Amino acid sequence: MENLIVFGHKSPDTDTICSAIAMSDLQKKLGKEVKAVRLGELNKETKYALDYLGVEVPELISKVEDNQEVILVDHNEFTQSVDNIENAKIKMVVDHHRISDFKTAEPLYYRAEPVGCTCTVLFKLYKENGVQIDKKIAGLMLSAIISDTLLLKSPTKTDEDEKAVKELAEIAGLDYEKYGLDMLKAGTDLSDLSGDELINLDCKEFNLNDKKAKVAQVNTADIPEMMTRKAEFEAAMQKDIATNGVDLFVFAITDIINSNSEVIVLGNSAPIFEKAFGKTLEDNTAFLPGVVSRKKQILPVLQENA
Ligand code: MN
Ligand code: MN
């Protein structure tokens, strides 16, 4: 394996994959030997972007060798990283999430900004390093920002994301609104996935005051249609709770057109959710108007009340 590998989180999303590819491109242009890899299967939205742009899918890895030098993008929490991350030497992190349970033995480059997407930070890094962004990489970074900010509609979106989108769309030669909607829609075609696959498609594990919490999310244009499969999702969640000792499992089904979420909540610590959101679960579900961001509208609320 290369001296240096770069990867994003498990259950990879478009930002994780595109950030890994863009970061390896930037580092190569700065003279480093580096390779982008991934920790899981691509979702349909990411596949759409890579196909459209004609970009190769990074290699899948499940663990790293001892002392493997790595760059983390789009995450820092070890629960979301490669299984044996403790054995790696983390050289760099570029991220836009909370920092939790992160430690290294040696100094490192760490860049985190509270923007909507890791690729927005990378966009700035290209500029700071005086490296030109080529057309394909611009398309990838644009896809990531559209994905993470739901076409600039999420409350996580900042002016910097918007600025990056406009400039990257120009370089990529793409009408970002049309391309973005097509890409997001490609990601909502979930009919052929099992309940198990759906709860793991975009699932993140968090440590909430020593409780093991999982918050999974899927995008849809039709919440009622997704909810016809509620029993199947619940069975998959219960199985995961029993197998992995999960205390709280929140599955958010997010309507990307109207910007709302319906959640299914299970686990012994479900009362944490009820207290945090001031809602009584009905049949294990609750409707959260205006909620689309796990990072900004779900996790901090749970964290404060855990
Ligand atoms: Mn991500
Ligand atoms: Mn991201």
Image (cartoon, rainbow, N blue to C red):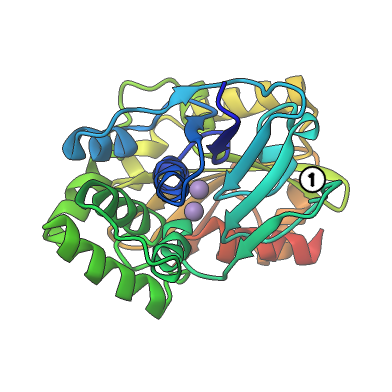
Name the residue type under label 1. Answer: Ser
Image coordinates of residue 298 in percent, x first then y, are: 60, 60
Tell me which corner region of the image, top left, top right, bottom left or bottom right, holds residue 149: bottom left
Can residue 147 be seen? yes
Asked if the beta carbon under badge 1 is closer than 8 A to the nearest atom of ligand 1, the reply is: no
Tell me which corner region of the image, top left, top right, bottom left or bottom right, holds residue 165: bottom left
The correct choice, above or below, for 301 with respect to 148 in the image is below
Image coordinates of residue 178 in percent, x first then y, are: 12, 56
283 with respect to 272 (left or right): left
- Residue, far front: 31
The correct choice, above or below, for 82 with respect to 136 in the image is above
Circle 1 packing at 10 Å, graded few (<14), some (14-19), many (20+), is: some
Can residue 250 be seen? no
Tell me which corner region of the image, top left, top right, bottom left or bottom right, holds residue 234: top right
74 with respect to 219 (left or right): right
Could you say whether the residue bearing mark 1 is in a helix, strand or loop? loop
Question: Which residue is label 1 attached to?
Answer: 269
The correct choice, above or below, for 288 with respect to 218 in the image is below
Q: Nearer the viewer, residue 215 or 173?
A: 173
The residue shown at (88%, 47%) is 210
Q: Nearer the viewer, residue 305 or 28?
A: 28
Q: Dividing the image into 4 quarters, which one contains the N terminus?
A: top right
The residue shown at (48%, 33%) is 35
Q: Dividing the image into 4 quarters, which one contains the C terminus?
A: bottom right
The residue shown at (60%, 43%) is 71
Image coordinates of residue 138 in percent, x first then y, are: 26, 55
The residue shown at (16%, 52%) is 179
Q: Nearer the viewer, residue 92 or 152?
A: 92
